[in-house]
Amino acid sequence: MVLYYLHMRTPQAQIKINLPLRFKEFVESKASQFGMPLAAYMQYPTYEASEKVIKETKKALREKNRAIEVKDVHKFFKDL
């Protein structure tokens, strides 16, 4: 399977993006940490979640026992 993937030919398109210089330098430094070229790193960028997202996620996990199972989404929203 892996060999098939390595030799698979897929159509590609080249795009051009404009980045602020500071962001470009930041992304290049992140890519170099993994030994990747900028184009490969930009294909799979990762970012830290904001404090708000982290806070809301922790709250949701604490309250997961209050969740309800919805079998029919249309009926659920109709009955709200």
Image: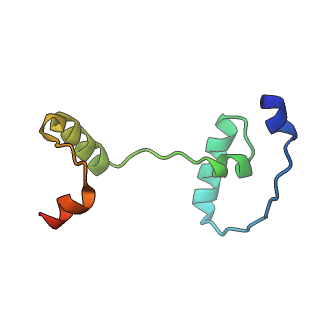
Instruction: Please identify the quarter of the rendering in which residue 69 is found.
Output: top left
Percent across and percent down for residue 13 are: 79, 64
- For residue 1, above or below residue 58: above
Q: Nearer the viewer, residue 10 or 40?
A: 10
Number of numbered markers: 0
* Residue sitting at x 65%, y 52%: 42
Percent across and percent down for residue 80 are: 11, 63
Percent across and percent down for residue 70 are: 22, 48
Instruction: Please identify the quarter of the rendering in which residue 31 is found.
Output: top right
| Quarter of the image with the N terminus in it | top right
* Residue sitting at x 16%, y 43%: 68
Q: Nearer the viewer, residue 32 or 16?
A: 16
Left of 44 or right of it: where is 50? left
The colouring scheme, among rainbow, by chain, secondary structure or one colour, is rainbow
* Residue sitting at x 66%, y 69%: 18
Left of 56 or right of it: where is 38? right
Q: Nearer the viewer, residue 38 or 76?
A: 76
* Residue sitting at x 73%, y 68%: 16
Q: Nearer the viewer, residue 77 or 42?
A: 77
Percent across and percent down for residue 78 are: 17, 66
- For residue 78, above or below residue 23: below
